[in-house]
Image (cartoon, grey):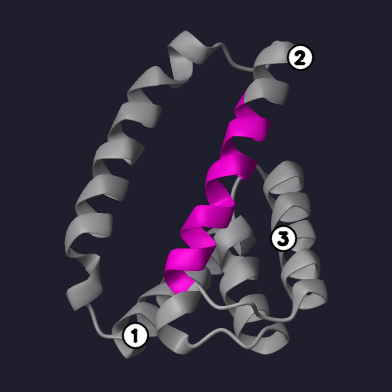
């Protein structure tokens, strides 16, 4: 990853962390558009950068929720294992997915999630 606009990266990370903390998920939905808008990252760098930024957000969120007793790490383990397997598979083979498809897929997920929560 090239050095992009550091302020833009910080703002994008802050927004993703706030969204993840408030809603329990969705940081990547904020992060991808903000990294595209606020940094000089190339299209091919935005999605992998987003994944790298989301990992520490997820670790902090798990630690905080475990500390306040919302969820125990044992209860989260099946989800952690499944997401680790999915992340590994996409990390290994996801480079072959065209960026346009990734944008459309993310857009559809955002739309589906929004409709689901509004209805």
Residue 40 to residue 113: above or below: below
Residue at which label 1 appears = 99
Q: Main secondary structure of the magenta part?
A: helix
* Residue 48 falls in image quadrant: bottom left
Asked if disc 3 and disc 2 are in contact, CB closer than 8 Å, the reply is no
Residue at which label 2 appears = 68
Q: Secondary structure at mark 1?
A: helix
In the image: residue 58, left or right of residue 109: right
Distance between the alpha carbons at the discs numbered 3 and 1: 21 Å
Q: Front-most of 10 and 83?
A: 10
Neighbours of disc 3 within 10 Å: few (<14), some (14-19), many (20+): many
Residue 99 to residue 105: above or below: below
Residue at which label 3 appears = 13
Q: Which residues are magenta?
A: 47-62
Distance between the alpha carbons at the discs numbered 1 and 2: 39 Å
In the image: residue 72, left or right of residue 63: left
Q: Front-most of 63 and 2?
A: 2
Residue 116 to residue 81: above or below: below
Distance between the alpha carbons at the discs numbered 3 and 2: 23 Å
Question: In the image, which disc is placed on residue 88?
Answer: none
């Amino acid at each position: 990853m090239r050095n992009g606009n550091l302020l833009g990266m910080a703002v994008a990370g802050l927004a993703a962390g706030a969204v993840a903390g408030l809603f329990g998920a969705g940081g990547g939905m904020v992060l991808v558009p903000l990294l595209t808008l606020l940094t000089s990252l190339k299209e091919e760098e935005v999605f992998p950068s987003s994944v790298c930024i989301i990992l520490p957000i997820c670790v902090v969120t798990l630690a905080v929720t475990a500390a306040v007793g919302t969820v125990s790490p044992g209860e989260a383990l099946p989800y952690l294992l499944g997401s680790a397997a999915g992340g590994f598979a996409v990390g290994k083979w996801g480079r072959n997915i065209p960026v346009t498809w990734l944008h459309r897929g993310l857009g559809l997920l955002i739309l589906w999630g929004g409709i689901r929560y509004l209805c």
